[in-house]
Amino acid sequence: MTGLYLDAYSGISGDMFLGALLDLGVPHDHLAGELEKLALPGWRLEGERVEQHGVNGTRARVHLVDVPQPHRHLSDIREIIQSSSLSSRIQEGALGVFDRLAHAEARVHGTGVEEVHFHEVGAVDAIVDIVGACIGLQYLGVSGFTCSPLPLGTGFVRAAHGTLPVPAPATLEILTASGAAVLPGQGEGEMVTPTGAALVAHFGRFKDTAVLHPVKIGYGFGTRALPWPNALRAVLTKEQPRPALETDTVTLLECNVDDMSAEIFPYVIERLLERGALDAWTTPGTMKKGRPAAVLSVLVNTGDEERFADILLRETTTLGVRYIPWRRFKADREMCTVHTQWGEVRVKLKLLDGEVADAAPEYEDCARLAREHDVPLRAVYEAAANAARQP
């Protein structure tokens, strides 16, 4: 199984990561061709060879042409990505990275996620860097990577909101929420950008790697001059440096509700999932004096507790929300589209050791085809599941 290790001794930015992927062998033509599936005018990608202090590598540059580029909200970026013909895996990865950026900016500026104006991180070059990174990872057959501790740097950086301390507030928010391993004060200037932090937070893990079996090394160079090669060193490995089952930390929020109409629960659960909850459900319970009740449970990413607690307090009659961190084991998952005799169905694949262990067709797709062709829902569901299990 192919793995990837990032030696971020000079930090990480979106263009450094993209340059490292190009240096590892992702073809420029493939990358540019996939990126052209985005309805995003006004840019050109260049990969140039760079030598610093005797070390050779690749610098990725996004050149902007004379096309007006508006400030964009998260909804605008979602539309650009979801309306493309990129694979579902690439779309999900890119949207996940931008979601982390949006929530960090919202926390810093005290606004709602959908109100955030993307300046630096929403610019064309950042969209290209993030989507391009997802394209490169898929090409290399890598679903994630391990990363060295990140140097936070010192000093100040110019941004759309003025002069900000290093690391930029959004960068520090992202790294804090993800539990990243950092090296405070190491390096001069901005060593980790918000885009780089979001890529690491979404795809990376910070675990001790006792054994690596290197296959290829790539260097993605940044634009600043440092006393050493200013590059992100990416090591492609023969084996993924992780345990058989991946683990992560999430947070469980719960509240007891015994004085609300049962009709409201489906709406609240739907709203929670739309806002990015990992899962939500109810469990029957009995309160004091024998009153029937429901325990509403929500599973969220670490760092999102307050946002979802606010939804529960506003949308239900509960007076309090409790929460606790949970550790969990996770199977790999992947979305694919299969063809049945009635039409196409999206299927979520459960992967163990790289093999398909289970397939769950999307209910809405199956229900739509069942209605259109007047066939049993179960027949469409089973046909899609069987098609997904085929090698």
Image (spheres, helix red, strand yellow):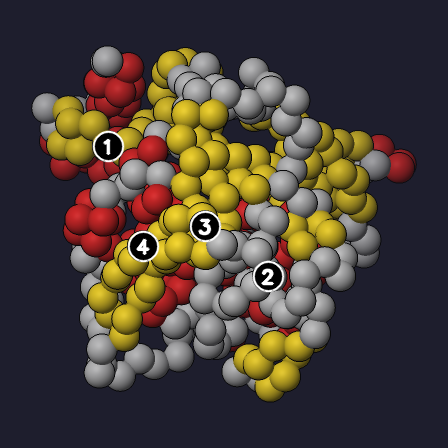
The tag on residue 49 is 4
Residue 307, image x, y percentages: 66, 59
**Mark toward the start of the polypeptide (3 vs 2):** 3
Q: Nearer the viewer, mark 1 or mark 4?
A: 4
Distance Cα–Cα, label 4 vs label 2: 19 Å
| Residue at x-position 46% and y-position 61% | 222
The residue identified by callout 1 is 337
C-alpha gap between disc 1 and disc 4: 38 Å
Query: Contact, CB < 8 Å: mark 2 with mark 1?
Result: no
Task: Please indicate, yes or no, whether residue 47 appears anywhere in the rendered image.
Answer: yes
User: What residue is shown with label 3?
Assistant: 54
334 left or right of 326 in image: left
Residue visible at 45% across and 66% down in the picture = 223
Residue at disc 4, secondary structure: strand
Q: Are marks 4 and 2 in contact (CB under 8 Å)?
A: no
Q: Amino acid type of disc 3?
A: Gly
Crowd band around label 1 with a 10 angstrom C-alpha radius: few (<14), some (14–19), many (20+):
some
Q: Earlier in the sequence, mark 4 or mark 2?
A: 4
Residue under label 2? 227
Between disc 1 and disc 3, the foreground one is 3
Q: Nearer the viewer, residue 294 or 342?
A: 342
Measured as percent of width and height from the top left, residue 107 is found at 65, 67
